[in-house]
Image: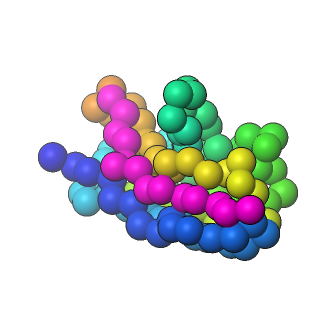
Amino acid sequence: QVQLVESGGGLVQAGGSLSLSCRASGVIPGVHNMAWHRQVPGKQRELVAEITGSGQTNYAESVSGRFTISGDIAKNTVNLQMSSLKPDDTAVYYCYVYSWNWGRGYWGQGTQVTVSS
């Protein structure tokens, strides 16, 4: 079964930077975009950023200008460069892809990002 494998994350001071990466363990056909979400305990998972196969990107207002998403849809890899981090960015970050061919979505296992004040 195909899995999304995430790496990166960790502990950083406010104002610092971190980079997250996500790759699929196999080929996932029919992927039109890939995304990063995040979740804080007790709150709903929220979209952070997404990228399409044509390179179009979309960001949550709270991270626009600070985070940069990049990746290769064909290779099912996606990265998230985070800078000027704030304590409010503390969350578990998940990558996500949806396969239109298989009619299902895939989530990564999640990676913790902690920003200290």
Residue 36 vs residue 77: left or right?
right
> Which residue is pictured at 61% across the width and 37% down the height?
47
Residue furthest to the front: 117
For residue 77, say whether it is visible. no
Q: Position of residue 30 (x, y in %)?
A: 39, 41
Residue 8 vs residue 90: left or right?
left
- Along the viewing direction, whichever of 16 and 104 lies nearer the viewer: 16
- Along the viewing direction, whichever of 4 and 113 lies nearer the viewer: 113
Residue furthest to the right: 65
Q: Is 105 colored magenta in this rendering?
A: yes
Please provide the residue range marked out in magenta.
104-117
Q: Position of residue 37 (x, y in %)?
A: 55, 42
Q: Is 46 colored magenta in this rendering?
A: no
For residue 7, say whether it is visible. yes
Residue 46 vs residue 8: left or right?
right
Image quarter for residue 76?
Answer: bottom left
Q: Position of residue 14 (x, y in %)?
A: 75, 66
Q: Quadrant of the C terminus?
A: bottom right
> Which residue is pictured at 74% across the width and 40% down the height?
60
> Which residue is pictured at 84% across the width and 57% down the height?
65
Image quarter for residue 61?
Answer: top right
Tally of numbered tags: 0
